[in-house]
Amino acid sequence: MSAFALRFGVWALGLAALGTVPALAQSDPHAGHRGMEVRPASPAASAEAAVHAGHDHRVGPAGATYDLRFIDGMVQHHIGALRMSEFVFGIGQPGVGALARTIWRDQAAEIRAMGLWRKAWYPQAPVYPVVLAAGGDPNSLQGLARMSPAQMEAMRMVGAGPTNENRVVWFLEGMLQHHGGALVMAHDALANSSNPTVRRFARGVIVAQRAEIMDLRRMLALEGLRKPEYHQYDALFAL
Protein backbone atom coordinates (compact mmCIF):
# COMPACT_ATOMS: atom_id res chain seq x y z
CA MET A 1 0.00 0.00 0.00
CA SER A 2 1.46 3.36 -1.04
CA ALA A 3 1.61 6.04 1.62
CA PHE A 4 1.95 8.77 -0.98
CA ALA A 5 -1.75 8.96 -1.84
CA LEU A 6 -2.58 9.18 1.86
CA ARG A 7 -0.11 11.90 2.71
CA PHE A 8 0.27 13.98 -0.45
CA GLY A 9 -3.22 15.40 0.01
CA VAL A 10 -2.50 16.13 3.67
CA TRP A 11 0.48 18.40 3.04
CA ALA A 12 -0.86 19.82 -0.22
CA LEU A 13 -4.04 20.99 1.47
CA GLY A 14 -1.86 22.58 4.10
CA LEU A 15 -0.36 24.99 1.58
CA ALA A 16 -3.58 26.96 1.79
CA ALA A 17 -2.80 27.67 5.44
CA LEU A 18 0.61 29.25 4.81
CA GLY A 19 -0.61 32.57 6.12
CA THR A 20 -1.16 31.21 9.62
CA VAL A 21 1.62 32.68 11.77
CA PRO A 22 1.83 31.89 15.50
CA ALA A 23 2.11 34.81 17.89
CA LEU A 24 5.50 34.82 19.60
CA ALA A 25 5.60 36.06 23.17
CA GLN A 26 8.42 38.02 24.75
CA SER A 27 7.78 36.86 28.31
CA ASP A 28 8.61 33.52 29.87
CA PRO A 29 5.35 32.05 31.26
CA HIS A 30 6.71 28.51 30.99
CA ALA A 31 10.07 28.96 32.71
CA GLY A 32 11.53 25.65 33.80
CA HIS A 33 10.65 23.70 30.65
CA ARG A 34 13.61 22.29 28.79
CA GLY A 35 14.26 21.18 25.24
CA MET A 36 14.16 18.12 23.04
CA GLU A 37 16.28 16.01 25.35
CA VAL A 38 13.63 16.27 28.08
CA ARG A 39 10.59 13.99 28.17
CA PRO A 40 7.46 16.06 28.70
CA ALA A 41 4.09 14.52 29.49
CA SER A 42 3.15 11.76 27.07
CA PRO A 43 0.29 12.35 24.61
CA ALA A 44 -0.89 8.82 25.28
CA ALA A 45 -0.38 6.56 28.24
CA SER A 46 1.38 3.97 26.10
CA ALA A 47 3.70 6.36 24.26
CA GLU A 48 6.40 6.39 26.93
CA ALA A 49 7.17 2.72 26.40
CA ALA A 50 7.18 3.19 22.65
CA VAL A 51 9.87 5.86 22.51
CA HIS A 52 12.98 4.58 20.76
CA ALA A 53 15.67 3.58 23.24
CA GLY A 54 18.04 6.42 24.08
CA HIS A 55 16.03 9.23 22.48
CA ASP A 56 12.65 10.82 22.96
CA HIS A 57 11.21 12.13 19.71
CA ARG A 58 8.86 14.59 21.35
CA VAL A 59 9.97 18.20 20.94
CA GLY A 60 8.88 19.88 24.16
CA PRO A 61 5.77 21.62 25.47
CA ALA A 62 3.08 23.48 23.57
CA GLY A 63 3.72 27.11 22.76
CA ALA A 64 4.08 29.54 19.89
CA THR A 65 7.27 27.83 18.70
CA TYR A 66 5.93 24.28 18.97
CA ASP A 67 5.21 23.94 15.24
CA LEU A 68 8.69 25.21 14.38
CA ARG A 69 10.27 22.66 16.72
CA PHE A 70 8.03 19.93 15.34
CA ILE A 71 8.90 20.80 11.73
CA ASP A 72 12.62 20.86 12.42
CA GLY A 73 12.48 17.57 14.29
CA MET A 74 10.34 15.85 11.67
CA VAL A 75 12.53 17.08 8.81
CA GLN A 76 15.57 15.52 10.47
CA HIS A 77 13.56 12.35 11.08
CA HIS A 78 12.59 12.22 7.40
CA ILE A 79 16.20 12.74 6.32
CA GLY A 80 17.01 9.58 8.23
CA ALA A 81 14.34 7.68 6.31
CA LEU A 82 15.81 8.88 3.00
CA ARG A 83 19.27 7.68 4.00
CA MET A 84 18.03 4.32 5.20
CA SER A 85 15.97 3.73 2.06
CA GLU A 86 18.91 4.39 -0.24
CA PHE A 87 20.73 1.31 1.10
CA VAL A 88 18.14 -1.04 -0.43
CA PHE A 89 16.98 0.69 -3.62
CA GLY A 90 18.42 -2.06 -5.81
CA ILE A 91 17.37 -5.05 -3.74
CA GLY A 92 15.73 -7.78 -5.79
CA GLN A 93 13.84 -9.34 -2.94
CA PRO A 94 10.03 -8.95 -3.32
CA GLY A 95 8.78 -5.58 -2.25
CA VAL A 96 11.82 -4.29 -0.33
CA GLY A 97 13.29 -2.02 -3.00
CA ALA A 98 9.85 -0.82 -4.08
CA LEU A 99 8.85 0.05 -0.52
CA ALA A 100 12.13 1.90 0.00
CA ARG A 101 11.54 4.01 -3.10
CA THR A 102 7.99 4.80 -2.01
CA ILE A 103 9.19 5.88 1.42
CA TRP A 104 11.92 8.03 -0.13
CA ARG A 105 9.48 9.72 -2.51
CA ASP A 106 6.83 10.39 0.12
CA GLN A 107 9.18 11.76 2.73
CA ALA A 108 11.14 13.91 0.29
CA ALA A 109 7.82 15.52 -0.73
CA GLU A 110 6.95 16.13 2.91
CA ILE A 111 10.34 17.70 3.59
CA ARG A 112 9.65 20.20 0.80
CA ALA A 113 6.18 20.95 2.20
CA MET A 114 7.47 21.44 5.73
CA GLY A 115 10.13 23.80 4.42
CA LEU A 116 7.39 25.99 2.90
CA TRP A 117 5.42 25.99 6.13
CA ARG A 118 8.52 26.96 8.12
CA LYS A 119 9.30 29.92 5.87
CA ALA A 120 5.72 31.16 5.94
CA TRP A 121 4.99 30.70 9.62
CA TYR A 122 8.39 31.56 11.11
CA PRO A 123 10.13 34.01 8.73
CA GLN A 124 12.34 35.30 11.56
CA ALA A 125 13.52 31.85 12.65
CA PRO A 126 17.17 30.87 12.23
CA VAL A 127 17.98 29.01 9.03
CA TYR A 128 19.35 26.08 11.05
CA PRO A 129 17.14 23.51 12.85
CA VAL A 130 16.25 24.40 16.42
CA VAL A 131 15.19 22.83 19.71
CA LEU A 132 13.90 24.31 22.93
CA ALA A 133 16.84 25.50 25.02
CA ALA A 134 17.24 24.44 28.63
CA GLY A 135 14.91 26.73 30.56
CA GLY A 136 13.78 28.33 27.30
CA ASP A 137 10.42 30.00 26.72
CA PRO A 138 8.36 27.81 24.32
CA ASN A 139 6.55 30.97 23.16
CA SER A 140 9.66 32.86 22.04
CA LEU A 141 12.28 32.39 19.34
CA GLN A 142 14.80 33.56 21.94
CA GLY A 143 13.99 30.42 23.91
CA LEU A 144 15.38 28.17 21.19
CA ALA A 145 18.84 26.74 20.60
CA ARG A 146 20.55 25.27 17.57
CA MET A 147 19.96 21.54 17.19
CA SER A 148 23.24 19.78 17.89
CA PRO A 149 24.78 17.19 15.55
CA ALA A 150 24.06 14.54 18.19
CA GLN A 151 20.39 15.58 18.35
CA MET A 152 20.12 15.52 14.56
CA GLU A 153 21.61 12.03 14.41
CA ALA A 154 19.28 10.86 17.16
CA MET A 155 16.27 12.17 15.25
CA ARG A 156 17.45 10.52 12.04
CA MET A 157 17.80 7.08 13.69
CA VAL A 158 20.12 5.70 11.03
CA GLY A 159 22.89 4.34 13.23
CA ALA A 160 25.64 2.21 11.76
CA GLY A 161 25.07 1.26 8.16
CA PRO A 162 24.39 -2.31 7.04
CA THR A 163 26.54 -4.84 5.25
CA ASN A 164 25.54 -6.24 1.88
CA GLU A 165 24.56 -9.44 3.65
CA ASN A 166 22.27 -7.94 6.32
CA ARG A 167 20.89 -4.85 4.62
CA VAL A 168 17.40 -6.27 3.98
CA VAL A 169 16.72 -7.11 7.63
CA TRP A 170 18.64 -3.97 8.74
CA PHE A 171 16.32 -1.83 6.63
CA LEU A 172 13.10 -3.61 7.58
CA GLU A 173 13.77 -3.66 11.32
CA GLY A 174 15.29 -0.18 11.32
CA MET A 175 12.43 1.34 9.37
CA LEU A 176 9.91 -0.28 11.67
CA GLN A 177 11.59 1.48 14.59
CA HIS A 178 11.90 4.67 12.56
CA HIS A 179 8.18 4.68 11.77
CA GLY A 180 7.48 4.11 15.45
CA GLY A 181 9.37 7.31 16.20
CA ALA A 182 7.20 9.13 13.68
CA LEU A 183 4.07 7.83 15.40
CA VAL A 184 5.35 9.22 18.71
CA MET A 185 5.97 12.60 17.08
CA ALA A 186 2.58 12.65 15.38
CA HIS A 187 0.72 11.96 18.63
CA ASP A 188 2.82 14.62 20.32
CA ALA A 189 1.76 17.11 17.65
CA LEU A 190 -1.91 16.22 18.12
CA ALA A 191 -1.48 16.86 21.85
CA ASN A 192 0.43 20.14 21.57
CA SER A 193 -0.30 21.87 18.25
CA SER A 194 -3.40 23.93 17.51
CA ASN A 195 -2.37 24.51 13.89
CA PRO A 196 -4.91 22.74 11.62
CA THR A 197 -2.28 22.06 8.95
CA VAL A 198 0.10 20.41 11.41
CA ARG A 199 -2.75 18.42 12.92
CA ARG A 200 -3.88 17.17 9.48
CA PHE A 201 -0.29 16.29 8.69
CA ALA A 202 0.09 14.38 11.97
CA ARG A 203 -3.07 12.36 11.31
CA GLY A 204 -1.78 11.54 7.82
CA VAL A 205 1.51 10.36 9.29
CA ILE A 206 -0.31 8.01 11.67
CA VAL A 207 -2.45 6.51 8.89
CA ALA A 208 0.49 6.08 6.52
CA GLN A 209 3.02 4.81 9.04
CA ARG A 210 0.76 2.17 10.53
CA ALA A 211 0.07 0.83 7.01
CA GLU A 212 3.78 0.69 6.23
CA ILE A 213 4.57 -0.93 9.59
CA MET A 214 2.21 -3.74 8.62
CA ASP A 215 4.02 -4.06 5.27
CA LEU A 216 7.38 -4.15 7.07
CA ARG A 217 6.13 -6.91 9.37
CA ARG A 218 4.95 -8.97 6.41
CA MET A 219 8.35 -8.63 4.76
CA LEU A 220 10.12 -9.57 7.98
CA ALA A 221 7.88 -12.62 8.23
CA LEU A 222 9.13 -13.64 4.77
CA GLU A 223 12.60 -13.53 6.33
CA GLY A 224 11.37 -15.83 9.10
CA LEU A 225 11.27 -13.07 11.71
CA ARG A 226 8.25 -12.51 13.96
CA LYS A 227 9.58 -10.76 17.07
CA PRO A 228 7.32 -9.40 19.83
CA GLU A 229 9.05 -6.00 19.63
CA TYR A 230 7.67 -5.54 16.13
CA HIS A 231 4.35 -4.75 17.85
CA GLN A 232 5.59 -2.23 20.40
CA TYR A 233 4.00 0.71 18.60
CA ASP A 234 0.56 -0.84 18.05
CA ALA A 235 -1.01 1.31 20.77
CA LEU A 236 -0.11 4.39 18.70
CA PHE A 237 -2.02 3.23 15.61
CA ALA A 238 -5.27 4.83 16.81
CA LEU A 239 -6.13 8.39 15.82
Image (tube, rainbow, N blue to C red):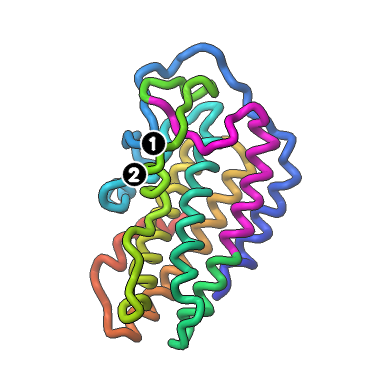
Judge by depth and name the residue closer to the eye, 189 or 156. Answer: 156
Residue 63 location, x and y as percent? 51, 27
User: Which residue reaches farthest top?
Assistant: 27
Q: Are marks 1 and 2 in contact (CB under 8 Å)?
A: yes
Residue 181 location, x and y as percent? 39, 54
Visible residue check, residue 234:
no
What residue is pinned by disc 1? Answer: 36
- Earlier along the polypeptide chain: callout 1 or callout 2? 1
Identify which amino acid the numbered label 1 is placed on.
Answer: Met
Disc 2 residue crowd, few under 14, some 14–19, many 20+, Cα 10 Å: many
What residue is pinned by disc 2? Answer: 56
Residue 227 location, x and y as percent? 24, 73
Give the residues in magenta.
106-133
Residue at position x 47%, y 22% in the image = 143
Visible residue check, residue 158:
yes
Identify which amino acid the numbered label 2 is placed on.
Answer: Asp
Distance, label 1 to label 2, CA atoms, is 7 Å
Disc 1 residue crowd, few under 14, some 14–19, many 20+, Cα 10 Å: many
Q: Is residue 2 left or right of residue 48?
A: right
